[in-house]
Image (spheres, rainbow, N blue to C red):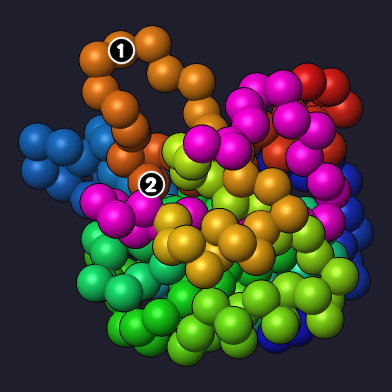
Amino acid sequence: MTSAPASGPRPGSDDGPAAPVPPATPQGGPDADRAVGVGPWEGEWPAGGHWDPELLRAGDRRNVADHYRYWSLEAIVADLDTRRHPFHVAIENWQHDLNIGTVVRTANAFNAAGVHVIGRRRWNRRGAMVTDRYLHVHHHPTVADFVAWARAEGLAVIGVDIFPDSVPLETHDLPERCVLVFGQEGPGLSEEVHAAAEATLSIAQFGSTRSINAGVAAGIAMHAWIRRHAFGQHP
């Protein structure tokens, strides 16, 4: 298939502890003190294959964690691959759902093993804020194709939506190896996914609306997995 780490040597590096990262260099203008990222590397360049020469030369303005400053894209992905969590995320995309970018960005934040788009291949990447470059994003043209893949990988298919047989996410013990599946905004989870799911979970709500945004629901569900399996909290 195709957290902030502890201090000390980074996985994949061959030169001991990562070199210190200089502070961001203001570029002028009224927002200069709020410059994003860091400027060109000051002093002798560090040794190691994970550094990106162009970023060392010009500065690194990407939205990446500080310990990844000046690393090449390929090196960051390789390092994340050594620490991926064993859950996947899938979202149905029959009508070009605009929430997919948000789901992808959140999956990156929680270092999911992969993101799966079911239905249309094309999706709006704007909301992902280029975080899809650091993830493994897969496409499944049909629900049947997706379900066959999940079963071959030994992953429990867990739907997240409101159905008569849904059980509360808050009290459900999420399996460690699973794929959390979300429907698109409006129609919600398809009946085909609902039928294939080992369980369908709902999120407790206390206001007047019947449902919440699909991108928000995905973030809540992913964090529930993190609390259970990264922090050992039991429902």
Name the residue rendered at 33%, 32% in the picture: 211
Residue 107, compared with residue 24, is above or below; it is below
**Residue 218 location, x and y as percent?**
49, 45
Do labels 1 and 2 touch, CB within 8 Å? no
Task: Evaluate whether residue 55 shows in this view.
Answer: no
Task: Tell which circle, 1 or 2, labels the residue nearer the N-terminal end.
Answer: 1
Amino acid, disc 2: Gly
Outermost residue, front side = 164
Residue labelled with disc 1: 207
Name the residue rendered at 9%, 36% in the picture: 30
Residue labelled with disc 2: 215
Residue 193, compared with residue 225, is above or below; it is below
**Residue 38 location, x and y as percent?**
43, 52
- Disc marking residue 191: none
The magenta region covers 164-188
Q: Is residue 192 magenta?
A: no
Name the residue rendered at 66%, 58% in the picture: 197
Circle 2 SS class: helix
**Camera-side residue of 92 and 39:** 92
Amino acid, disc 1: Gly
> Relative to residue 77, is residue 215 drawn left or right?
left
User: Taken as a whole, is the magenta stretch helix, strand or loop?
Assistant: loop
Name the residue rendered at 55%, 72% in the picture: 116
**Camera-side residue of 204 and 8:** 204
